[in-house]
Amino acid sequence: MSQDETEQTNNDEEIKPSEKAEEESKTTTIGEMMSEHNEKLQKELTDYKDKYQRTLAEMENMRKRLINEKQDMINFAVENIIADFIQPLDNFENALGFTDQMSDDTKAWAQGFQMILSQFKDILNDNGITTFHSMGKQFDHHKHDAVETEERDDVEPGTITKELTKGYMRHDRVLRHARVVVAKSSKDSSTDEEDKQVNHEDEGETK
């Protein structure tokens, strides 16, 4: 081999390591770029998935809210209609309460009306509407309207002593408050009178 050929071979051997390093550097750079790109795509995919799940959750909540609002509107309409029938129904029942004072012919008619009244009550029960009893129970402003009070020392103050009109409920919702008379202690009345007397005397002294 000539001297020129030997020098050329040596030069080729000197160049090859640098080229290899450059290629390795390029490969590493491309790998890092691919890795960064994959991470970016994974992050975007996660973000889109979260947004999709939130959107689904919001749509489900909206669907439930619309169903509840629709049901509330139906319940409100039903309760309003039923509330309009309650008072005539009470009057009907009160009128039939005087059956014993009627003639035999009228009693026969009253029995037929009593059956009709029972059918009305069955319809109310089927729709979850019931009456609640108040006699002997403590006054509850959520369920009762106090029409008047009476002095009673044989029962605790606040006890309902008379039920003038029945109260009605639909499930756990009050449709109509019961109109009642509530007991109060005679001592309370005496105290009120004493307070009025003291106030009257104070006014007289002021004058």
Image (cartoon, grey):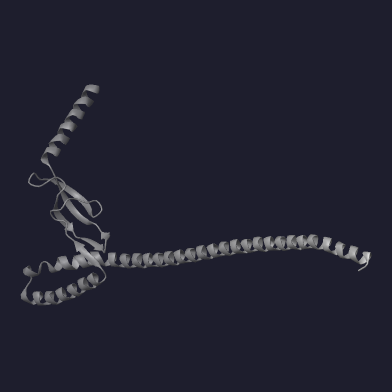
Drawn side of residue 81 relative to residue 88, left or right? right
Judge from the rendering whether residue 60 lies leftward or rightward of residue 128; answer left or right: right
**Of residues 125 and 96, the one drawn nearer to the viewer in this rendering:** 125
Establish if 106 lies above or below 76.
below
> Residue placed at 7% from the left, 46% from the top?
154
Q: Seen in the image, is 4 located left or right of residue 47?
A: right
- Dividing the picture into quadrants, the one containing residue 13 is bottom right
Return the x and y of residue 160 as percentages of the image width and height.
15, 51
Q: Residue at left 21%, top 50%? A: 146
Between 118 and 204, the one lying in front of the other is: 118
Which residue is at a point 18% across and 75% down the rendered structure image? 116
Q: Is residue 207 visible?
A: no
Q: Which quadrant does the N terminus fall into?
A: bottom right
User: Whole-percent x and y of residue 109?
Assistant: 12, 77
The answer to which of 20 and 44 lies nearer the viewer is 20
**Which quarter shows the C terminus?**
top left
Q: Is residue 4 visible?
A: yes
Measured as percent of width and height from the top left, residue 2 is found at: 93, 67
Q: Please identify the quarter of the rendering in which residue 25 is found.
A: bottom right
Position in image of residue 156 (x %, y %)? 12, 46
Towards the viewer: 18 or 33: 18
Q: Name the residue located 51 percent from the left edge and 65 percent from the top edge.
A: 53
Q: How many marks?
A: 0
